Amino acid sequence: MNTEHAANGPSHGNGQSPATAAHSQGHDDHHIHEDNRNFFQRYVFSSDHKVIGIQFLFSGLIFFVLGGLLAMAIRWQLAWPWSPVPILSQALWSDPALGYRMPPEFYNKLFTMHASIMIFFVIIPLLTGAFGNFLIPLMIGARDMAFPKLNMFSYWAMPFAFVAILYSFVVEGGSAEAGWTSYPILAIARWATPGSLNGQTWWLIALLFAGISSLMGSINYITTIIMLRAPGMTMFRMPMSVWALFITAILQAFALPVLTSALVMQLLDRTAGTNFFSPVGWTVGNAPPVVGGGQTLMWQHLFWFYSHPAVYIMILPAMGFVSDIISTFSRKPLFGYKPMVFAIAGIAGLGFIVWGHHMFQSGMNPALGATFMLSTMMIALPSAVKVFNWLGTMWGGRLQLTTPMLNAMAFVAMFIIGGLSGIFMAATPVDIHIHDTYFIVAHIHYVLFGGSTFGIFGAVYYWFPKMFGRMMNEPLGKIHFFLSFIFFNGTFFLMHIIGMHGHPRRIADPSIYPFLQGAGIVGMNKIMTYSAFGLGLAQIPFVFNFFYSLVFGPKAGPNPWRANTLEWAAPSPPPHYNFETIPTVYHPAYEYSVPGLPDDYLPQTQPRPAEAGPLDPVMA
Amino acid sequence: MRYWSLLFALAAIACVAAFLYSPFSPDWWLPNNPSNPHHVVSTFGREIDSLFLIILAITGITFIGTQVALVWVAFRYVDRVDPEGRPVRPATYFHGSQRLEVVWTIIPAAILVFIALYQMGTWAAIKFRSSAPKVQPLAEVTGRQFQWVMRYPGPDGRLNTPDDLHLVNDLHFVKNKMALIYLKSSDVLHSFFLPQMRIKQDAVPGLTIPVWFDSDTAGNYELACAELCGWGHYKMRGNVTVHESQAEFDEWMRKALEAQNVSQLAAASGPQGEMTSQ
């Protein structure tokens, strides 16, 4: 019984941890709590990590729809500036003075809210909230998070953020329109633009709540991973998903306080008359001058000190998922597991000293820019190592091109583009030209859609059977993948070209500029818009597949993909408290196609046969 | 299942094709003077473009190499089963290669450090204040919602004197002469962007930032605002005129000053001071 007793305690080395740990937890299989009491405690105010993960999944996907619709409206305006937008024009701008035309400030609201929603309400909550919550305890062999109540609060901080961000659309002046970066002074001077009147305040409040949610989550993830690993689950036996989520949680825990304090400062500047970011005697839009004495650029430093690590928060978990998916469907051990772990750690470490590359043209001392160029170049290195290792994993494997695998391969293919385009903007002189153009927009979408979102798609298809106990439909999944891949590239690849041509981002009407009036630029803008609509429509099979499979999908066994990691040792869906008996882990997660075994996989719960020889100590 | 490799191949080919085609279309490639689309007008523009091309070549080779590998594995290593449902070929049991890891860490590291160091000179020449040309400033340019306010020093060559010339959205300078401006903002952030000269610098409230640039071809160019500055950001556009000679510039300046010094009242009124429009 001792191994089970120690289940939730710290596991030292090969897991023979003292039974004392059981006293502090008391979750051995003799007094597992009954599955929670009533409907509300079970599905709404639940402290079960699986339910919380699924709550994050649903709210993230709902906001994904909203963010996507905002993007469609952006594309409409760029392809056919000022022409009536279907539905929106009739609903909002039928006033004769507006003549069904989108007001320019509304365009600014669109891209501001598109980015804010996609980043803070979709990608981060889906990666860390949904999959982080669902996967971490299952993959390390724990019954729940270390702090289940804190976990519940971390989800229930989000509805405040949802309400604030949605309410901001209807306040006087409308939602925020200073960009998702919210640079002062535009963001703090109430009369600078309509969205800065009230909407910006609500934006700040929404982000504060989202930040509180992330912070509670990250503390929980770190503690859980350090303290609650199953016997035998040493750090270097953890799957890449857990490693990625662990390092992401550390990034969040260290970077978020900086953003939070910056948000509070901006909130005080807006509401309490402080002057953190406004220079002496400053005035905008004929408003009375402020006392001032602050520094405009300080916001950019504080914001990017969080938001650059946030870019990695938005990609590292996806990298972890993709590593697991690729290894599973290549039926082959992950190539260079330990180098992959160190690469993630390297990205995270370097991620803290590259924020200045967003500020090369900001008026920051250019000598400082030169140092940020070097650190930014170096962060491409661990990313490159990861790509090579993924390719090495597939090389010589038996590739099963299931929907999750195709999405994971698309992640690799598209992340290569997003990574390589980053080198252009890391080079400070080249960045002078492409900074704040569509080249940047292309880059971020290749990383966040081509990378993170395909990673999320892959993860949804891969772990759906575990979450809901049913398989998703493969042909529909492949249709969804095929259309998304085509239209994604159609939407975003040409942005590199128009960005190179100097097309500034965030402008409501490119036809103002003669150098953007050529047939090529205009035509490319239209192709991108058609592709964006295609990309939107391509999500319909996904939504249908998701809900249809939820009810009618064929029942999945505990391990439909024949994978090694611990979550597949639990039933699908896992019961309350996950494991009947806490599993014991014998080897790393990637022992596929071990020679001499009848099966091409070897779950972590089964010992490695002696005849397979010792594991490579450096790589595995 | 092998057909999926085609999808990845076609996407990669389309990406490469877009970059191979764009240099031949002035509309796709970097922005230049429309009358001579394959000539970069400014010194810094030529340097930046050559650095851009070097990075494009390096990343292009890397892109092709990795995509070929991806397409190849998707084609070659797809799982196939014999009629009894057994895999035709087992997957290799292999955890990695220390030698390969070292190779694909050292080589990219060397290339990346090379790229970074190779850029430093141009960056310093364009942005370091120590490299600013020792010339009379051409103008003080102030961004405000939503226009560029230009203040030229006038005949005395000194800013902030009564003979200054004030213009809006109208930047003039002489070809083959390094022009130096002082960039300011009077309200929110703006960014001074000369696409044809590859110059960009944010205008920051509370700071005065020197910016310098040149052009070897006279003509009309554009000035854009590249930093979101409010509802009218998209229309914050200025005209840039590069004059053939200093004499032409001086002549333009004389006329502009003359126009400025006509009082608004005199321009709008008849000889007796009555409003002509009424």
Image: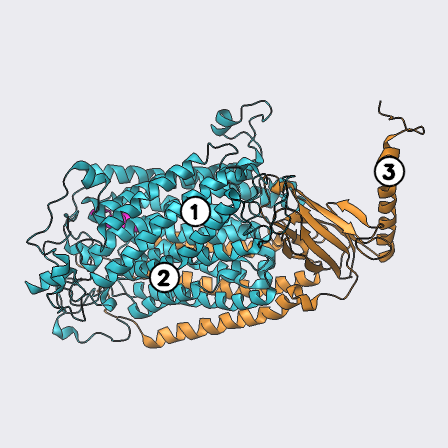
Q: Is residue A516 above or below residue A551?
A: below
Q: What label does residue A183 carry, if any?
A: none
Q: The chain shown in orange is which? A: B
Mark 3 or mark 2, whichever is nearer to me: 3
Magenta stretch mostly in which secondary structure? helix
Label 2, label 1: how far apart the Cα atoms are: 22 Å
Q: Sequence order check: which comes first, mark 3 or mark 2? A: 2
Residue A228 in the figure: left or right of residue A362: left
The residue wearing badge 2 is B72
Q: Is residue B171 visible?
A: no
Residue B273 in the figure: left or right of residue B116: right
Label 3, label 2: how far apart the Cα atoms are: 75 Å
Q: Which residue is drawn at 54% across and 56% down?
A: A298
**Chain letter behind tag 1:** A
Q: Position of residue A165 (x, y in %)?
A: 42, 39
Q: In this view, does A555 lie above or below A17?
A: above
Q: Where is residue B47 in the image (x, y as percent from the top left)?
A: 65, 65
Disc 2 crowd rating (10 Å Cα; few below 14, some 14-19, many 20+) is many
Same subunit, labels 1 and 3: the answer reads: no
Secondary-structure class at tag 2: helix
Disc 1 crowd rating (10 Å Cα; few below 14, some 14-19, many 20+) is many
**Which stretch appears magenta?**
A458-465
The residue wearing badge 3 is B263
The residue wearing badge 1 is A488
Res A138 quadrant in image: bottom left
Q: Depth check: give the residue in front, B278 or A76.
A: B278
Label 1, label 3: how far apart the Cα atoms are: 58 Å
Quadrant, the C terminus of chain B? top right
Circle 1: residue type: Phe
Q: The chain shown in cyan is which? A: A
Q: Residue at x 56, y 55 (%)?
A: A297
